[in-house]
Amino acid sequence: MAEDSLKGYRGEARAVLERLGISVWDDVEMIAAGNSFKGVVLPRSETADDRHVVLKLYNGYNIGIAASKVESAVRAGSREAHYKIPEKEFPFNPGLPRVKLLGTGGTIASRLDYRTGAVIPAFTPGELYGAVPELAGICNLQTEKLFGIFSEDMGPIQYKAVAEAIGKEIEKGVSGIVIGHGTDTMHHTAAILSFMCQDLPVPVVLVGSQRSSDRPSSDAALNLMHATRTAAYCDAAEVMICMFGPTSDKYGLLHRGTRVRKMHSSYRSTFRTIGDIPLAMVDRSGFTYLKKDYRRRDHGRKPRINPVFEERVAMVYYYPNMHPDMITGLVEKGYKGIVIAGTGLGHVNKPLYEPLRQACEAGVHVFMTVQTLWGYTQMYVYDTGRLLMQRGVVPLANMLPEVAYVKLCWALGMSGDHDEVQKVMTTPIANEMTPSEPPDGYLILQGGVPEVRQMLAGKIR
């Protein structure tokens, strides 16, 4: 058996495959623990254990089978591995809008390299056309790779570069901009771009995928189609996130960049608008606008691009028994701003009162948000809140904690003047604070209750 025929396999798993005469990329029927599994033997990631054999079942899903449970295997044939994504020339249609896709990373329109476990991105127009041919009927697509990093590695350097790239593309006259981004911190990037890039004449749409393109349940292609359609034709010229609406493939939702949050680690419908409703629904045929207060597309409008960011800002999630040194330590380390995600209406324990007073007197900007996400900081209701405001802590209405964090970084990047920073933070710029929450802006579908059971049964429309 050739060395490469068992790529990535070691130990017990390799011994089993050698005994059965099975190689990587063989079509097999494998019997394990009395059950039959039909599929293709995949290579093992170089960082994987040595106790499992991996099959890609014919339904498209991968399964790991304990080598110790494998009883027999029958080889039905073999396949050839193709790691390069098919590439076709993206056709130019003079009648379609021009859209620019800026890449930062993530798994949008990509596939998995099973040899290493790494994701191979499809990014050139030709690769994207080969992966998602429907794009050619939506727009004339151009692409530029700014970075190739995980979303948790996005930070000030990347935020500034993306904002500057947005400004340059708008100057070139594009109809809209799509930003490919990993989903974990996509809402942070959407929020900071909402402040760095104001008065946009065209849509700026962040998009990603929860599941890579090699999976039959992948949301990558549909999300990309919805995002490019939004960039090309949507009337809302704002920073938005475009991702799955329901868990089905019916439509995507357009979420305002300052009112959106990732709310589930694996659901395709992970992004939710908090304290408001989404801007619109998007599907293959067009848009259903849910709000009327968005900024309209206007190619004559000049954007204001202001990519500044102060890094010495912290976000503190309050918890019971938090000790004063959590605050004093930040002050001693030279932090210029602190955003607190407090309990209830904006509360912390009494041991933090004095260090927060000292922080404010030392010139540190301290703001309060609520960790409930929905609802407002209302610090005048209880003594706790009033005493904190007396010490210099400023409430931020219904601004989300992550949004308050990046806004404070941006505000301090523009000015160190106390009054100016306070004014910027308490003045709505991109709907990060709203006068009220709509009655249907907060809806928890608690499983098991009669209303939800009736809805799932189709009795409630």
Image (tube, rainbow, N blue to C red):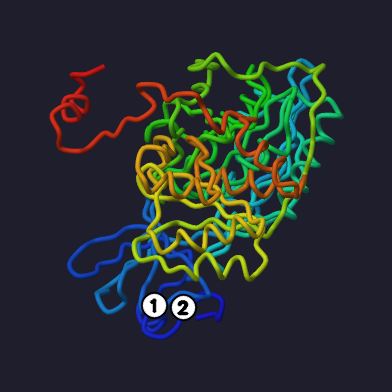
Q: Would residue 387 be found to the left or right of residue 151 on screen?
A: left
For residue 82, say whether it is visible: no
Q: Nearer the viewer, mark 2 or mark 1?
A: 2
- Horizontal and vertical percent position of residue 112: 54, 57
- Horizontal and vertical percent position of residue 46: 53, 75
Q: Earlier in the sequence, mark 2 or mark 1?
A: 2
Residue at 25 percent of width and 67 percent of height: 31
Tag 2 near tag 1, CB within 8 Å: yes
Of residue 421 and residue 64, the one placed in the foreground of this image is 421
Outermost residue, left side:
450
Q: Which mark is residue 2?
A: none
Of residue 392 and residue 235, the one placed in the foreground of this image is 392
SS state under label 1: helix
Tag 2 residue? 9
- State how far apart marks 2 and 1 are (Cα): 9 Å
Tag 1 residue? 17
In which quarter of the view is residue 223 placed?
top right
Amino acid beneath label 1: Leu
Amino acid beneath label 2: Tyr
Q: Is residue 241 above or below residue 87?
A: above
User: In the picture, which quadrant includes the C terminus?
Assistant: top left
Q: Would residue 201 be found to the left or right of residue 367 on screen?
A: right
Q: Would residue 348 be found to the left or right of residue 366 on screen?
A: left
Residue at 73 percent of width and 30 percent of height: 198
Residue at 63 percent of width and 70 percent of height: 332
Q: Residues within 10 Å of mark 1 (few under 14, many from 20)?
A: many
Of residue 396 and residue 147, the one placed in the foreground of this image is 396
- Horizontal and vertical percent position of residue 109: 59, 44
